[in-house]
Image (cartoon, rainbow, N blue to C red):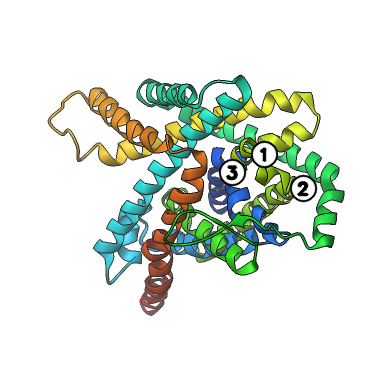
C-alpha cells in the first residue's frame, strides 16, 4: 500500500499543499488587482501571458523547500533552510528569515493601505481614517481574536476566490471582444511602468524586455510564502508528491493570475490613467459589469480578506519574535499584545506611503532582494543538496 502511495503525485498532502499556495497567493493583494496591473497588464497585449513564466519560477523554488523538508522530515523553515542552503546553511537561514520578515511588513502595509483605499472609494472616507480603522481592527483581532480569524480564514479565502471566479467568468465573457481587439491591434502602453533598480518611478513605452523584468520581480516577492507551503507538506512520503503539489499549484495559480490579468487588460488604457481605478482595478472592473449584487458583495469580501490576511501575517510575525523579545514579561498575552502593536505600527507607518508605493516600490525591491536571498541560492545549493541526499539514501538501501 505504501509503495502505491509513493508512486502517486496527487495525494491528500500534495493537493493540500497546492491549495495552501493557491489560497495564500489569491488573498487580499491578489483580489484587489493592484499587483496584476502593475507587474503584468499595464505593459501591453502580451502582459497576461507572463504569469505562466512567473509561476513556473515560483514552483521550481518552492519545490526545493518542499523536497528538502520531506527528506529531512523537518518542516519548520528555520530548520530545513539550514540544510537547503548548505554549505552556507546558517547564513541562508538568516537570509530567509529576513526575507519573510520583510514580506510580512510589506504585505501587511499593503493590506492596511488597501483598506484605506477601499474606505475612500466606497464610503468617501479620507485615507487616513481608513488606515487608522484598519490599524485598530487588525490590532484588536491580533490580540483578542486571532484564533477566531484563523479558524475562519479558509472560509474567507474560499469566499473571495468564488467571487473572483464569478467576476472573471462574467468579465471575460462580457469583455471578450475588447480583449480580442486589443490583441488584434497589438496594443502597447506608451506610458507603461518603467522597471529600474535605482532612480524615481517613471514611465516608458511598453516592451517585452521591460515587462519581463517586472514579471521576474513578481516571482521574487512571492518567496515569503515558501515557509508556509513547506510547513503544509508535512506527512508527504515521496518526491513525486512534491512534484505533484507544484504541478497542481502551478496550474491553479497560473490560470487564476493570467485570468485576472486578461480581465484588467479589457480596461486598458483607461484603467491605467484613472488613479482611483489603478489603486483597486478589480473593483473598478466589477463596477463595469453592471451586476448590483457584486457591487455589494465584492467590497465586503475584499474587506474581510484584507482583515484576515493582515491578522494572519501579524500573528506569524509575533509567533516568530515571541521567544526572543520581552522575555522578562511573564504575562504571555501582554507580551504578545505589545509585539502585535509594535509590529502593526511599523506596518501602518509604511502603509502611509500608499498602496501603489508598496506594490510598485516596496514589492519591487523585495522581489529583487529575494532573487539573491532565496531563489538563486536555492537553485544553486538546494538542488545539489537534494541530489546528494538521494544518492546517500540509495547507497544505504
Mark 2 falls on what kind of element?
loop
For label 1, the residue is 282
- Which residue is at a point 42% across and 75% down the rendered structure image? 387
Please state which of residues 243 and 310 is positioned toward the viewer in this rendering. 310
Q: Is residue 238 left or right of residue 162?
A: left
Can you see residue 136?
yes
Q: Quadrant of the N terminus?
A: bottom right
Give the Cα separation between the discs numbered 1 and 3.
8 Å
Please state which of residues 285 and 56 is positioned toward the viewer in this rendering. 285
Q: Is residue 180 above or below residue 141?
A: below
Mark 3 falls on what kind of element?
helix
Whichever of labels 2 and 3 marks the residue nearer the N terminus, that label is 3
Toward the left, the furthest residue is 328
For label 2, the residue is 266
Q: Position of residue 211 (x, y in %)?
A: 60, 63
Q: Is residue 266 left or right of residue 300?
A: right
Mark 3 is surrounded, within 10 Å at the Cα level, by few (under 14), some (14 to 19) or many (20 or more) other residues, namely many
Whichever of labels 1 and 2 marks the residue nearer the N terminus, that label is 2
- Which residue is at a point 41% across and 26% down the rendered structure image? 135
Mark 1 falls on what kind of element?
helix
Badges 2 and 3: C-beta atoms under 8 Å apart?
A: no
Amino acid at each position: 500500500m505504501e509503495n502505491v502511495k509513493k508512486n502517486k503525485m496527487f495525494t491528500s498532502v500534495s493537493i493540500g499543499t497546492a491549495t495552501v499556495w493557491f489560497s495564500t497567493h489569491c488573498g487580499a493583494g491578489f483580489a484587489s488587482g493592484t499587483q496584476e496591473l502593475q507587474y503584468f497588464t499595464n505593459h501591453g497585449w502580451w502582459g497576461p501571458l507572463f504569469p505562466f513564466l512567473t509561476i513556473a519560477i515560483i514552483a521550481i523554488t518552492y519545490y526545493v523547500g518542499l523536497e528538502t523538508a520531506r527528506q529531512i522530515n523537518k518542516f519548520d523553515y528555520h530548520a530545513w533552510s539550514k540544510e537547503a542552503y548548505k554549505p552556507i546553511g546558517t547564513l541562508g537561514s538568516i537570509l530567509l528569515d529576513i526575507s519573510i520578515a520583510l514580506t510580512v511588513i510589506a504585505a501587511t502595509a499593503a493590506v492596511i493601505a488597501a483598506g484605506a483605499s477601499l474606505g475612500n472609494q466606497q464610503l468617501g472616507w479620507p485615507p487616513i481614517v481608513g488606515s487608522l480603522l484598519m490599524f485598530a481592527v487588525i490590532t484588536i483581532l491580533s490580540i483578542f481574536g486571532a484564533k477566531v480569524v484563523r479558524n475562519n480564514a479558509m472560509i474567507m479565502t474560499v469566499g473571495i476566490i468564488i467571487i473572483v471566479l464569478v467576476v472573471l467568468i462574467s468579465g471575460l465573457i462580457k469583455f471578450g471582444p475588447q480583449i480580442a481587439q486589443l490583441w488584434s491591434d497589438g496594443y502597447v502602453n506608451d506610458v507603461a511602468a518603467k522597471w529600474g533598480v535605482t532612480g524615481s518611478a517613471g514611465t516608458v513605452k511598453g516592451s517585452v524586455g521591460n515587462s519581463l523584468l517586472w514579471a521576474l520581480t513578481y516571482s521574487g516577492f512571492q518567496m515569503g510564502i515558501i515557509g508556509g507551503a513547506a510547513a503544509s507538506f508535512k506527512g508527504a512520503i515521496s518526491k513525486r508528491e512534491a512534484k505533484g503539489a507544484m504541478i497542481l499549484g502551478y496550474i491553479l495559480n497560473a490560470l487564476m493570475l493570467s485570468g485576472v490579468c486578461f480581465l484588467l487588460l479589457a480596461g486598458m488604457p483607461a484603467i491605467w490613467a484613472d488613479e482611483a481605478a489603478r489603486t483597486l482595478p478589480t473593483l473598478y472592473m466589477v463596477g463595469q459589469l453592471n451586476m448590483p449584487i457584486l457591487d455589494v458583495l465584492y467590497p465586503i469580501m475584499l474587506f474581510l480578506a484584507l482583515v484576515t490576511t493582515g491578522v494572519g501575517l501579524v500573528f506569524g510575525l509575533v509567533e516568530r519574535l515571541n521567544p526572543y523579545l520581552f522575555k522578562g514579561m511573564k504575562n504571555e498575552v501582554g507580551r504578545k499584545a505589545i509585539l502585535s502593536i509594535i509590529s502593526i505600527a511599523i506596518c501602518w507607518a509604511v502603509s502611509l506611503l500608499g498602496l501603489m508605493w508598496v506594490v510598485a516600490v516596496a514589492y519591487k525591491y523585495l522581489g529583487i532582494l529575494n532573487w539573491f536571498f532565496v531563489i538563486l541560492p536555492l537553485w544553486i545549493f538546494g538542488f545539489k543538496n537534494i541530489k546528494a541526499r538521494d544518492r546517500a539514501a540509495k547507497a544505504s538501501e
